Image (tube, rainbow, N blue to C red):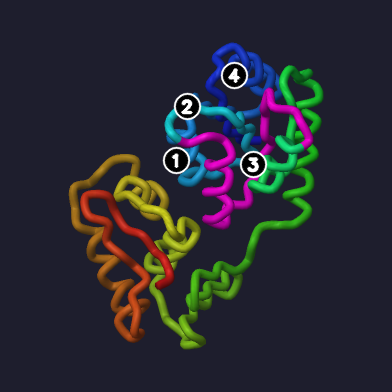
Amino acid sequence: MRILLVEDDPTVAGFVAKGLREAGHVVEHSDNGRDGLFMAASESFDAIILDRMLPGGIDGLRLLETLRSQNNSTPVLVLSALGQVDDRVAGLKAGGDDYLTKPFAFSELMARVEALTRRGKADGPPTKLTVGDLEMDLLSRAVRRAGQKIDLQPREFRLLEYLMRHAGQVVTRTMLLEGVWDYHFDPQTNVIDVHVSRLRQKIDKPFPTAMIHTIRNAGYMLRPE
């Protein structure tokens, strides 16, 4: 499994990461809420282990609420020294799938993570994406807005799928190059601008409101009006 660990305590983080890697898992680590949110939103993980109290201006509950508002359904195990009933309820209501109080045994943490990922696999991956009146069927590769069918070229489809999976958040040029074109370097061309322009002609121009927005000096964002 590929697991994101968001934990600012270096002792706890080292202990958990070492155990997960010894169990054969790939672990990415962030020690603050802001970077953790960016990684969780821009990369694909099988599970997230999330400390509740984090530096960086974004605590664990806020990070979790933001992910869920973006329709990110990655299973999340919340870690916290706050173990009262109200604390656990708050963590679950924010979108956590499970809550484990500190100190904990690694064997219990591993068992809980495995249970969460089994549950997620049973549900299966989504086959449809919906943002406002825009719909995408990933199986038939059909796209409709307000019930009207929209014909897209393969690269336009991949670009729109990426934007829809990250709806409501800024998508940078680097994210698009890696996620849509599989480039891990900037070829210094206007390929992104050209494809976004073509996509706008099909997704936005025939309709009264635009969904694809340019975020100055940052990238693009797809959101319903």
Residue named by callout 3: 46
The tag earlier along the polypeptide, 2 or 1, is 1
Distance (Cα) linking label 2 and label 1:
14 Å
In which quadrant of the rendered view does residue 109 lie? Answer: top right
Distance (Cα) linking label 3 and label 2:
24 Å
C-beta proximity under 8 Å, tags 1 and 4: no
Look at label 3 and name its amino acid.
Asp
For this rendering, which residue is in front, 151 or 144? 144
Magenta region: which residues?
Answer: 58-85
Q: Is residue 78 above or below residue 193?
A: above
Name the element at disc 2. Answer: loop
Name the element at disc 1. Answer: helix
Residue 101 lies, in percent from the top left, at 74, 26
Residue named by callout 2: 55
Which of the labelled discs sits on residue 200, or is there none? none
The tag earlier along the polypeptide, 4 or 3, is 4
Q: Is residue 43 above or below residue 202?
A: above
Name the element at disc 3. Answer: loop
